[in-house]
Every structure is written in structure tokens, then in C-alpha cells.
Amino acid sequence: MFQEIKTELNDTPKTEVFACPVCYEPLIRKGPPGMNLPAIYRSGFKCSKCNKSFTSKDVFLDLTVTSGMKEYSELKPARTELFRSPLVSFLYERGWRQNFNRSGFPGRDEEFQMAQDYFKPVAGGILVDVSCGSGLFSRKFASSGAYSAVIALDFSENMLRQCYDYIRQEETPMNTNLALVRADISRLPFASCSIDAIHAGAAIHCWPSPSNAIAEISRVLKPGGVFVATTFLSTPTNSGPFSIDALRPLRQIVGPVNSSYNFFTEGELKDLCISCGLVNYSSKVQRSFIMFSGQKP
């Protein structure tokens, strides 16, 4: 799968940026160094405390609590499970995401630049793009060269596979500092105070528990670290792509979808960030679109 990249195999275990999702202890990595796809694929990870092991599946590293389980399985809320569908993963950048402009989303390039402006204080650090989907922004963050490493993180296996397909189609060098990781937004596999920047593009309304997720984001950010997110504001005439009308064509194919997404007012988003320990809250609003940011003190 990664034959075109040649790396020296380093058998000396070393502490990694990743942490165990069970006990949050640092993972010991055995394999070639680096945060690029081939190096991660060829590496094994093990918790230094509970001895749970983690390896890459397909093209991503699975750092969920359920990783490696053979008998147990669980389902998330329907709004989360929807994005694990191969069909939705395929369609996300082929029309679905483009419909967000009806609600005021400026579009990929402008949203990327807006986020980059917020991230200027942490340039050169590690950025995690949580709920990255098909990597719409992960790929731009990685190719910008502004960060020492970019981690594209999502709970959906198919979204991560789609991200990998786009990387290959765009001829992004496989040794770019970009890693694909499967993880739960409410159980981030990083040590406390270890990440410089976290981005969540059009995601918070899909999270099972936004308060738990923001608390986790606050936990893993370094002092001075920056969180930037976009979502749909709660309005009487919200016309986001998750309205019943917009979902109806997909419902005929993938089945009924729970439409109870979490739409918030700007005041609620500010309160959520502050309550989870973030400071310097700021936002930019355009119709139902909001980009907001907070910083770890």
C-alpha cells in the first residue's frame, strides 16, 4: 500500500504524541518515526500503563476504546452513524458540503483562511482536525506547511478512507506530516496539554455531547492553544443541510435519520467555551454560519 515510501525501521520504542483512550497514559511506539501515513501504518502502539495495543486498520490508526474488540460493538446516535455510511462519505465533498453556502458558509477557501488567521499564534505546532470528515480542511492544513504535524481525526472509518483516497488523487506526498486517526471526540487520545491547535469544521451540531467534547478539547490543548470551530446557528428559519427536506433523498437510501441535531445560539456557544475553561472567545457570523474560537489560558 505504501511501497513508494522507504523508511528506516527503528525498533527502539519511544513516547508518542498519542495517548491511550482508556487511561490517557502516553503510548509507546515501535516502528519508523514520523507523523506521515507510511510511518504510522508501519508502527505499533502500546499503552505504557494498561498494555492495550493499537495498530493501523486499512489506512488509519484506530485509537477508539473499542479498538481491537472482537465481540463487543456499540452504536452511536443516528446523526453520528449517518456519517459512517459509505454513501454519505462519498457524497460529502461531491455536493453535500457545497450546499452549506445556503446557510451562509463562505466556502472551503475562505473558511480555511479565516481559521488560519485564528491559528497564527500557534503556527509551527501540532494541529488536530477533529471530525475531519473526508479531510476537506485537514488536507489544506497539511499542505500549508504551517504546522509541524496535522492529525485528521474522525469516528467514521469510511470518512477516513475517503480522506486517504483524496490524498492519493491530489498527489499529496505520502511523507507529508499528515496522520489519519479514528477516535471519539468525547475521548480524545492525547495527553493533557499536548496539542497546539484544534479545528472542528461544521461538526459540533453532530456531536452526541458537545459539552463533553469541548471539555476534552480544553483538556488536551496546551496553555495558549487555540480551538476554532464552525457550525450552524439556531435560528427560526435555519435552512441547513440537516433539515428534514435536505435529508429526505438520503433517507430513501440509508434509512431514517434522527434529525435532532444540536443547533445553538451564539450565546450558548460562548457559554459552553467559557464553562469548559477557554478564554478570549471571539466569533464571526454570516446568516446561520458562525466561526468561533477560544484559547486555553
Image: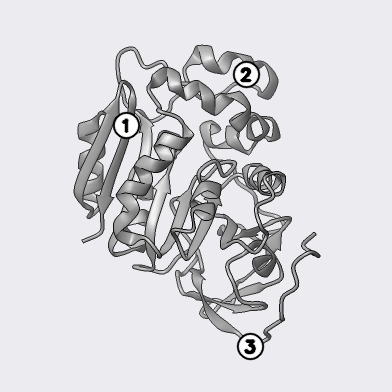
Residue 288 vertical placement versus 47 (above, below): above
Which of the labelled discs sits on residue 12, or is there none?
3
- Kind of residue at badge 2: Arg
* Residue that label 2 marks: 251
| Percent of width and height locating residue 98 | 53, 25
| Cα distance in 3D space between marks 3 and 2 | 50 Å
Of pointers 1 and 3, the one earlier in the residue sequence: 3
**Residue 21 point in image, percent of width and height:** 50, 63
The answer to which of marks 2 and 1 sits earlier in the sequence is: 2
Determine whether the residue tagged by mark 2 lies in a helix, strand or loop. helix
Tell which of 159 and 33 is nearer to you.
33
Estimate how packed mark 1 is, as few (under 14), some (14 to 19) or many (20 or more) residues with alpha carbons within 10 Å: many
Q: Is mark 3 on a helix, strand or loop?
A: loop
For image coordinates 43% across by 41% down, the residue present is 112
Crowd band around label 2 with a 10 angstrom C-alpha radius: few (<14), some (14–19), many (20+): some
Q: Where is residue 36 in the image (x, y as percent from the top left)?
A: 62, 64
Q: In the rendered structure, are the residues bearing label 3 and label 2 in contact, judged by CB atoms less than 8 Å apart?
A: no
The residue identified by callout 1 is 290
